[in-house]
Amino acid sequence: KAGVTQTPRYLIKTRGQQVTLSCSPISGHRSVSWYQQTPGQGLQFLFEYFSETQRNKGNFPGRFSGRQFSNSRSEMNVSTLELGDSALYLCASSARGWLEGGTTQGDTQYFGPGTRLTVL
Amino acid sequence: SQQGEEDPQALSIQEGENATMNCSYKTSINNLQWYRQNSGRGLVHLILIRSNEREKHSGRLRVTLDTSKKSSSLLITASRAADTASYFCATGIKAAGNKLTFGGGTRVLVKP
């Protein structure tokens, strides 16, 4: 199976602009999560989508939003970009959620290569 | 805030030696996953260990989990230059769905 893909791989924007990042999960996976990685804060959870519904959200301002489509592909959007939004944005997919049949202790999360966002 | 703290923050070893890194966490968990990251690229999944498991192996990797001490360790045996990377532990709890909480990572340098 093809792995998790993210587009674009690199992006340069200026302050105040908005950006949309895309993530295609592994075929058959229904859960997509997004993470931000910065040198100062490390890896931080942004949100998780499952079957087009946001199920969990991290501690980020409302400028960060996302959605998931019926084919499980997900997008995240950052509006009014700030310099501090420069980061590596990673998405992860997993086959099932906690409530799905069979698993009571979570599933492996598979990560994509990330989108490197630079805000000038 | 980060759930896990990894120790050491950096590790330098010779090829062929073993590398051990530790991860401690604060709250009860349902699973713990270890990942490798090369030079700011994507995370590669290594091993998932569930809270009712104590040890798992995968090739040259051995992971242990001690829930009473809220800690885990990752051992890489017979290290290779290609093992040079950052290694992260990440914890999952049922109440948080598929959210993972990451530690700060251990940077491993394997010298040829």
Image (cartoon, coloured by chain):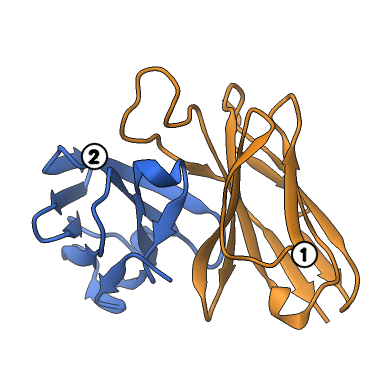
Chain colours: A orange, B blue
Q: Are marks 1 and 2 in contact (CB under 8 Å)?
A: no
**Badge 1 density bin: few <14, some 14–19, many ≥20, Cα 10 Å:** few
**Badge 2 density bin: few <14, some 14–19, many ≥20, Cα 10 Å:** many
Q: Chain of mark 2?
A: B
**Percent from the top left, x then y, of residue A81?**
82, 73
Quadrant of res A104: top left
Q: Which residue is mark 1?
A: A63
Can residue B79 be seen at all in this image of the molecule?
yes
Callout 1 amino acid = Arg
Q: Residue at x 27, y 49 (%)?
A: B29
**Alpha-carbon span between mark 1 and mark 2:** 35 Å
Callout 2 amino acid = Arg
Instruction: Please tell me which residue lies in front, B87 or A68.
Output: A68
Quadrant of res B107: bottom left
**Percent from the top left, x then y, of residue B96?**
43, 47
Q: Residue at x 52, y 64 (%)?
A: A44
Residue A45 in the figure: left or right of residue B93: right
Can residue A9 be seen at all in this image of the molecule?
no
**Percent from the top left, x then y, of residue B85?**
40, 65
What is the quadrant of the N terminus of chain A in the image? Answer: top right
**Percent from the top left, x then y, of residue A93?**
55, 38
Q: Which residue is mark 2?
A: B50
- Looking at the picture, does residue B97 appear above or below residue B78? above
Q: Residue at x 35, y 60 (%)?
A: B83
Q: Residue at x 56, y 58 (%)?
A: A58
What is the quadrant of the C terminus of chain A in the image? Answer: bottom right
- Looking at the picture, does residue A52 appear above or below residue A22? above
Q: Chain of mark 1?
A: A
Instruction: Please tell me which residue lies in front, B31 or A11.
Output: B31
Question: How many numbered circles does the render carry?
Answer: 2
